[in-house]
Image (cartoon, grey):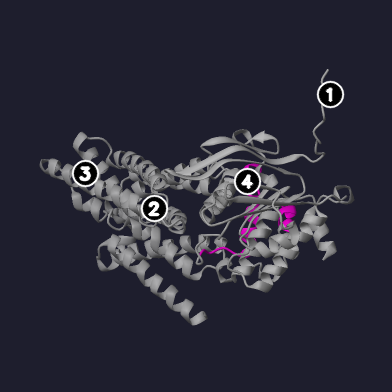
Amino acid sequence: MVAQIAAPVSCHREMVALENVSYAYGTQQVLDGVSFVARERDFIGLIGSNGAGKTTLLRMIVGLAKPQHGQIRLFGTPIERFKDWHLIGYVPQRSHFNPLFPATVREVVLSGLYGRRKLFRRLTKEDASRAADALRTLQIEDLADKRIGALSGGQQQRVFLARALINNPKLLILDEPMSGIDNETQRNFFHLLRHMHQHHNITFLMVSHDMEMIRSYLGDEPKETSGKLSFHVRHSHDLEDCGETDLLHTLRKEG
Amino acid sequence: MDLLTAEFFQRALIGGALIAITAPLMGLFLVLRRLAMIGDTLSHVSIAGVALGFLINVYPVAVGLVFAIVASFAIEALRRTYRTFAELSIAIIMSGGIALASILFTLGKGFNLNVNSYLFGSIYTLDYTDLAVIALVTAVVLLVVLLLRKELFLLTFDEDAASVSGLPVRYFNILISILTALVISASIKIVGALLVSALLTIPAACGLALARSFRQAIALVVVIGEIAVVGGLWAAGVWNLAPGGTVVLLLITMLLVSLGSRKLRV
């Protein structure tokens, strides 16, 4: 028998797997054979120049675009058969809503719950208190009844993060969440993300152009590169320490 | 006043009051999705169907409805092709509808085809069949909007987010198209094809100016639609004005008042 060296099997489950994924807009090849695996509790910073296909990659992972070649698996399930979308929170690049849209912050945050599971169901008291928790966690409870369009860019970004968090997602996908926000707000926001990563069972996949912030938390060297994309990864290992599963409650306790 | 007790006028009021619930409601969703002009388009295509109905001797509103539904599918398909140019698909289908309608109207010259009553509305000729159709359409639209209001909100606010939440966005879009086609075909006889889009869009424009939440916006558009239609029909009856035109002018007046009151508040 040939002695086999066992590959180090990770004890952490696979959250997102890309296998040889390619995408082209017409003849313009944006992504060419990208492969990558994100494991539970990783914080992945995705960096690349303009047009490197960062946003396209995220849009494919959340099912908004289909890869022309290759396969994507979410939580081990091929994306075509994946149904548990409530496990994924997504904060898109610029939320391109109309600033005149008549919706309050609370209505927008609650809408994070409206998926397959909530079809034909009424909102419950528990849903309302989840929304209140999410608002408190992101320190925007005093804005709850304001019109979303009346908020500043940084406040809006917190609203969309609150919407993404209301389901207690296991995977949080953020596309340049800090673009168009002043520096101090950016720092607070990033601090919040870091805190969530260290203390809760959430895997992060974040696109950013802010090298400095990514490097300070995820290190100088990318774990992997593919084409013009580089993946900086940091893993949080205190999985066992985190007894509580309800993110919003624990976040509140810790302030 | 005898007019108010006249049966034809009561039919007009009931039909108008029903349409004043559903048209502004669907209009709100359309306006918020930047598809305000879809009402105009579908009503013009629907007119072509009405003309065909007269030519082949089939209940014209039904043929109009079929045309509107086909057109709404075509718009949805074109909308996906020209993703960021939703208005382009609308313009194309609209001119197609007008072209077809003008040919059919010319063909039908020998027949007893009253173009004006469909272009400008003829609410006083509403019969019991029309009223039954309008009541049915109102019931269907209200039921669907009530059952799916959460999902419709998310879809309207952020279509991508709705898709990532796992909602069947394509089916929802088709559903909205069909409901819109239903409402438009039913309202053509009341305000006329040329003015249908006013009933869809102007209450929504008032709602955008005044509402602080989505709940409020929904309530506001219905209230504004009711005031305009019931008040407009009454005024038109009393002073012998064109009913469709009176309703629309009342809507525009209310929009001006909404905009003015917002200025005062801010």
* Residue that mark 4 sits on: A115
Q: Nearer the viewer, mark 1 or mark 4?
A: 1
Q: Secondary structure at mark 3?
A: helix
Image location (x, y in percent) of residue B266: 52, 80
Residue kind at label 4, given as amino acid type: Gly
- Find out whether the residues at labels 1 and 4 contact each other: C-beta distance under 8 Å: no
In front here: A144 or A16? Answer: A16
Instruction: Please state the chain letter of the residue tagged with numbered disc 2 in the rendered image.
Output: B
A164 left or right of B103? Answer: right
Residue kind at label 3, given as amino acid type: Leu
Give a yes or no on whether discs 3 and 1 share a subunit: no
Q: Secondary structure at mark 2?
A: helix
Check residue A3 in the rendering and tell me which mark sits there, or answer none. Answer: 1
The Cα–Cα distance between marks 1 and 4, rounded to whole angstroms, is 50 Å
* The N terminus of chain A - image quarter: top right
Q: Nearer the viewer, mark 1 or mark 2?
A: 1
